[in-house]
Amino acid sequence: MDAAIFRLPNDPAVGAAWLDHAAPAARDAARALAGLGADARNEALRRAAACLRAGAEHILAANARDVEAASGPAAFLDRLTLTPARTEAMAQGLDDIAALPCPTGRVLAEWTQPNGLRFRRVAVPIGVIGMIYESRPNVGADAAGLCLKSGNAVILRGGSDSLHSARAIHDAVAQGLVEAGLPAACVQIAPDADRDHVAAMLAAVNRIDLLIPRGGRSLVERVQRDARVPVLAHAEGLCHTYVHASADPDMARRLVANAKMRRTGICGATETLLIDAAIAPMLLPSLVDDLRRLGCDFRADPAARAIVPGLTPAAPGDFDTEWLGPILSVAVVPGVEAALAHIARHGSAHTEAIVAEDAEAAASFLSGTDSAVVLWNASTQFCDGGEFGFGAEIGIATGRLHARGPVGLEQLTTFRYEVIGNGQVRA
């Protein structure tokens, strides 16, 4: 089967009707995937990884076209850019997913009623996943791998900035599916960046079972506002690191520098430093010096500026800003409860961290935050599906239903009940 069979020509009239063809094909492919054993899915993932490696030169050339045409801040260009190492990481991610246990078919619970009926709650695929993403081209490979392993078909719609990269990655993955004997429609991608494709996916009731947007705030908010299909998403990654009075100073300096500056454009980067008033006079100058040497700027409250006078004053709204760049908001707080109150007022329920040697203070912080991920003595940049052992992630969820934090294989399943009797009838 031709890997491109489900890519329609770039004719606007045809493109507008793309989902009319793609969604039924995805539904058929999802049924086929659900009936396959783990070995067949794993072989498809390994072949897709091999095709990514074989096509690395083509993928990098396509990415170079996207980067050359792009403009924007450094964090945006970093998200867009592929390197040989990042391309290999995509392939390795598929191999890692193939090595994970199969998430479907698991018996989540079982019991027997007094009448002899036996009940089982069993993990099954969701069905057809719609993935709308913007500048990060590797998202397509991660989404394809996680959906294949969990028995779901996926319909991808990449952004205009990464169009050439996304299509080259899709071609390699689709070729791997074909070589493994799977339907090419298990992973499909929109033929162009026409926004009509997004509108069609948002309205695809009974065609797409779950939408996952991954991109900037405006994209995610539009999907959450307009979708008639269930959505799994987060709008912002306004993450905090709180340095408690009991923190080991050397550990605090390492963690804060990494949490902010390792990669400033990812959603798990710390955007606000909260530091305990009891330790701030001794530690804050060192933290500022460390970060300044790494190229960071600051937006600080009056208490922080009283300790380090050269800091830029925080303007209204700065503590509500996801900087996605080398800027850090800084506030001095009198203790754990004040730190939690600040996070509740300004945070986005994504990821928070406490640096502390006091186990009681750490326990209060861990239980007191309402965010999807909370860490003790670790960098917020560990909020990542690969670091969680998921192989990859299809996104981060900050809502209350179905899934929270990095979304991996288990979160791409639902369940059904199997009831086994021996002739029981209901009176």
Image (tube, grey):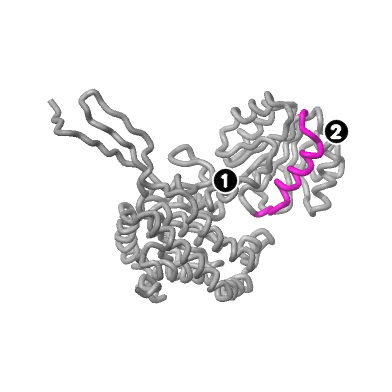
Count of numbered circles in the view: 2
Relative to 303, is 40 above or below?
Answer: below
Question: Circle 2 sits on which residue?
Answer: 281
Q: Are marks 1 and 2 in contact (CB under 8 Å)?
A: no
The segment highlighted magenta reads 245-265
Instruction: Please state the horizontal and vertical placement of residue 322, each as a whole percent of the image.
Output: 64, 48
Instruction: Please state the horizontal and vertical placement of residue 348, each as a whole percent of the image.
Output: 58, 41
Tag 1's secondary structure?
loop
Label 1 Cα neighbours within 10 Å, binned few <14 / some 14-19 / many ≥20: some
Q: Quadrant of residue 411?
A: top left
Q: Residue drawn 65% across and 54% down?
A: 265
Relative placement, left or right, of 217 versus 285 is left
Residue kind at label 2, given as amino acid type: Pro
Quadrant in which the N terminus appears: bottom left
Residue 8 bears which disc, if any? none
Residue kind at label 1, given as amino acid type: Phe
Relative to 343, is 78 above or below?
Answer: below
Q: Residue drawn 85% across and 40% down?
A: 285
Quadrant in which the C terminus appears: top left
How many angstroms separate mark 1 from mark 2 (CA)?
35 Å
Nearest the camera: 284 or 251? 251
Question: Circle 1 sits on which residue?
Answer: 388
Q: Residue drawn 63% across and 47% down?
A: 268
Q: Is residue 88 visible?
A: yes
Nearest the camera: 43 or 351? 43
Q: Residue drawn 27% across and 39% down?
A: 418
Nearest the camera: 286 or 318? 286
Instruction: Please state the horizontal and vertical placement of residue 163, each as a whole percent of the image.
Output: 52, 69
Instruction: Please state the horizontal and vertical placement of residue 267, each as a whole percent of the image.
Output: 61, 49
Tag 2's secondary structure?
helix
Mark closer to the chain start, 1 or 2: 2
